[in-house]
Image (spheres, helix red, strand yellow):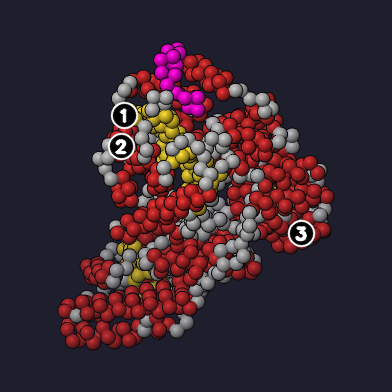
Amino acid sequence: MSVIRIPSPRSVIDRRELVQTIDKLVAAYGPAKSRQFVVETMRTALAEGRAEIERRLTEKPSAGHEIAEAQAFLTDQLLRVMHDHVVKHVYPAVNRSKGERLCFMAVGGYGRGEMAPHSDVDIAFLTPMKHTPWCEQVIEAMLYFMWDLGLKVGHSSRSLDDMVRMSKSDLTIRTAMLEGRYVWGDQDVYEEAQARFWRDVAQGTERQFVVEKLAERDERHKRMGDSRYVVEPNIKEGKGGLRDLHTLYWIGKYLHHVRDPGELVDAGLFSRKEYLAFRRAENFFWAVRCHLHTIANRAEDRLTFDLQREVAARMNYTDRPGKSAVERFMHMFFLQAKTVGSLTGVFLAQLDEQFAKKQPRGLLAGFKAKERIVKGYKVFGGRIKAPSDDWFTKDPVRMIEIFVIADKERLEVHPETMRQIQHDAALIKEEVREDTRANALFLELLTSRNDPETVLRWFNEAGVFGRFITEFGRVNAQMQFDMYHHYTVDEHTIRAIGLLAKIERGELKDDHPLAHDIVHKVRSRRALYASVLLHDIAKGRGGDHSILGSEIALKLCPRFGFDEEETELVSWLVRWHLLLSATAFKRDLSDAKTIFDFVEKMESLDRLRQLTLLTIVDIRAVGPGTWNSWKRQLIAELYNASEERLRLGHAQFGREQRVEAKKEAVRALAPENAALVEKVGGKLIDAYWIAEPEDVIAKNLAQLLAADDDPLSIHTEYDPARTATLVTVIASDHPGLFYRIAGGIHLAGGNIIDARIHTTRTGRAVDNFLVQDPLGRPFSEEAQLDRLRESIENALANRIKILPQLVAKPEVRPRADAFDVRPRVIFDNGASNRFTVVEATARDRPALLNRLAHALFEAKLMVYSAHIATYGERAVDTFYVTDLLGEKITSANRLKALERRLLEAASEAVADAEAEAQGS
């Protein structure tokens, strides 16, 4: 389309009035002296035009197309005025020669007539032959005007021959020229360029263009995370975003010369209904993109957490019970991204059919295979297809059956059939949901030993999953507004099922040795798969999703054909699916009471195995980098201790036997350890021997011996087994030692993930810390280890003021500011026989642990162990403490005062960081 039409164009920019103003300025000052006034006039017109467009966006916050087209219209008019001023006043040419002809066209997104407020202005200057000096002067003058207006310009300047040659050799240039739209100048040059593009560039290269464009798209998807359901999506480049829609349009235009997306219907690539879905998705994405640019006041296409809130508010989304405004907005976003995925499948299927009619080969098929029939379905070229248009209408259960066959036979469901299923999915009503055969087929699909993840994703994309399991439909495309979860609930669930299948197939033995070992020992694998399916099914309903989910399981499992025992097991697993990780990451596993309480909940070894497998796939499916060796070790430690207790009953070793067993284990590690145990082992109390693993004890003993009576010994080393750095500080014990060490570690750029604090019989502290960097990686280089040692030494020697420096450190995750995490403190005097367990939750900040530890010091408490868990923006720091006499804190008044002190500390850590951020 060569002309952009928008409502009330002159209120955006009045070109005639602008031209008259410029003519008057030139008449008054002359072409040279008037330049600054002309620039200022055009700059004012641009600012006023943008302000009007922003006003329209505020007034109609969902009018994506209208706003994007208005931006392009504003740019068109300014460039036309600019061109006419240059050729009329700056470089006028009388009797131009054949070569002194010039046109400029909009390319890229600007060529489509759609721009966000801060999009690049992509233009191509074209001349019939090699540039003449006059053409070069005009182009240069126009570019300087554009730069003076602050426009970000992407430009090319080519003769028609150059355009043909470069379009042939470069896919990006070819795509840009494909979208070329005449803006101004010599129209004959533009017409000739178009004719030559189609004749000399495009003709005969259709198949190559499609293949290259799809390969380019796949590469982009990989780069952007290869999922439509990442919680901070890129609206332009991400999977299911604007660029995917543009790719379809480019292909349609290249093959069928369509001039706007509506003609894709005439080309047979979309039905009318599908085209309307295309436009709705595109309109939504353009609206969001325009809001993003407006809020950020720059080109911003990533929908980050902080921007999600603002865009949701601007687009008039409001809170509803169980769902915040931002979650409702992102739900709509992911539904639109899902629509784009479905449209892509349909489009490519139609394309394949069209190519197949022209040649014996399909677009992607390598050979012409013979069609066969499998259970009434047509199978051809690795795809399964419904034999008739009324196939699913006659029996809606077939909409589940086809996916089961696809999984069994390792086939892809034909996109044309996917389109048919999407249309017929509304036929899945209550009688189908209660149908015994339908539920048996679904269970077969869920518990497949092949590739349930891929086929369940198709099942979901087709719209059948959410209709057959309506509870699953409620979490479809639902995000969780936090920095911990990377995917929507349905995507997370399907990924977790896929991980379980991979563990079962033995593909993740190295990543998950414990899961690999126990997965074939569970009594009911279908109960395990059902628990993975249902563990987050009640997210977004308000209330505890574990409790609500367990009630849903009681309703759904009998429908799946489960007996009473299996139903109760699935319900129990869903109810307690967070228990194992909470215990492993936030409790002291060397404390016998921790294991005792956990085992009481388990009741049986089978439940422990089932819950362990569910926990592992749940954490791993949260997103990249969430699972690590340290979590694997903690889960294995809890599992092994609980498994032993369940196997042997409650008969446990006495304290003396446990200490002796640990000493024996230390001696067995290396020949020299026996002497170490004899020489310095007696200095360490029984609680130390029980708490620490044998490899750490061996290192501590060697350090104790080497330190002798030195007032301070600091040892740092990379611990590959725990993917962390082990930091051991041996010093004269004194109040405040823990918070000072913690401050020193943080100042060196470290995050403490675990800490155990001990005092020897001679009054020396032996404190062990596991440390990682803010991205969850260990410090392994010598320079990093030296920096850790030096920072701790400076903190302990009072050579530095810890808190001011902590606050002054640059924030590693400023995105956390988008979240409101209310500080909370919980006391538990029943979790340990010896200690009061203090759990503090707050927004994660560098100063947090130091602040909390300092508050405990001021409250005259002794810290014996600390366990630090982070869930995105939320930190949960757990401390095992006693008073100075070694007693639990039981006084209600003292607990109240301690709670107040810790809440103040948590709030101060956030306030400090925020004050510093504002100061900088």
Q: Position of residue 885 (x, y in %)?
A: 46, 36
The residue singled out by tag 2 in the image is 796
Give the residue type that dot 1 points to.
Answer: Leu
Which of these two is toward me, 466 or 318? 318
Give the residue type that dot 3 points to.
Answer: Ile
Quarter of the rendering containing residue 168: bottom left
Give the residue type that dot 2 points to.
Answer: Leu
Marks 2/3: CA distance? 68 Å
Marks 1/2: CA distance? 9 Å
What quarter of the picture does the C terminus occupy?
bottom left
Please say if 419 is above or below 364: below
Please name which of the two marks, 2 or 3, marks the residue nearer to the observer: 2
Is residue 676 a member of the stretch shown in magenta? yes
Which of these two is toward me, 213 or 883? 883
Please say if 818 is above or below 134: above
Q: Position of residue 224 (x, y in %)?
A: 48, 51
Quarter of the rendering containing residue 82: bottom left
The residue singled out by tag 3 in the image is 428
Q: Identify which residue is drawn at 36% across, 40% down.
A: 736
658 lies left or right of 703: right
The answer to whether mark 1 and mark 2 are in CB contact below 8 A is: yes
Which of these two is toward me, 556 or 360? 556
For label 1, the crowd category at 10 Å Cα-Cα, with few meaning under 14, some 14 to 19 and many 20 or more, is some
Please say if 893 is above or below 347: above
The residue singled out by tag 1 in the image is 712
Q: Identify which residue is drawn at 35% across, 55% down.
A: 912
Most common SS among magenta residues: helix
Q: Identify which residue is drawn at 61% across, 43% down.
A: 579
Label of residue 736 in the image = none
Q: Identify which residue is drawn at 55% across, 52% down.
A: 487
Magenta residues, start to end: 670-689
